[in-house]
Amino acid sequence: MGDILGRGEKEVMALALKISDSLAIVDDGLARNYARDLGIKITGTVGVL
C-alpha cells in the first residue's frame, strides 16, 4: 500500500486482511483499487445507507 493512501485507509485494509469475510467501507477511488487488488470486499458509504 503506497504512501498515497491515508493512514485510516491503510488501517482499514490491514484489518480487513486479518478478519476473514470482512467488508471494508472505502470511498476513495485509489483506495478501492488497492482493496480490489488485495482481494478485499468493499462497499462505499452509499452502499451502507
Image: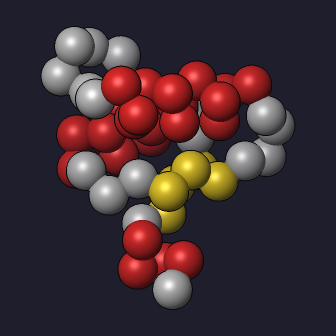
Q: Is residue 36 left or right of residue 17?
A: left
Residue 48 visible in rendering? yes
Q: Is residue 17 left or right of residue 28?
A: right
Instruction: Indicate the position of residue 28 as horizontal and vertical percent values.
Output: 25, 50
Badge count: 0
Q: What residue is drawn where x is 42% and y is 66%? A: 44
Instruction: Indicate the position of residue 31 as horizontal and vertical percent values.
Output: 31, 39
Q: What residue is drawn where x is 49% and y is 63%? A: 43
The answer to which quarter of the image holds residue 2 is top left
Q: Is residue 11 left or right of residue 19?
A: left
Residue 38 visible in rendering? no
Viewer-nearest residue: 20 or 6: 6
Q: What residue is drawn where x is 53% and y is 36%? A: 12
Name the image quarter holding the N terminus.
Answer: top left
Q: Is residue 43 above or below residue 11?
A: below
Furthest-front residue in this view: 7
Q: Is residue 10 above or below residue 22?
A: above
The answer to which quarter of the image holds residue 7 is top left
The answer to which quarter of the image holds residue 30 is top left
Q: Is residue 19 left or right of residue 29?
A: right
Furthest-left residue in this view: 4
Instruction: Tell me which colouring the rendered structure shows.
Output: secondary structure
Viewer-nearest residue: 39 or 30: 30
Instruction: Indicate the position of residue 19 as horizontal and vertical percent values.
Output: 79, 34
Q: What residue is drawn where x is 65% and y is 35%? A: 16
Q: Is residue 22 above or below residue 12?
A: below
Furthest-right residue in this view: 20
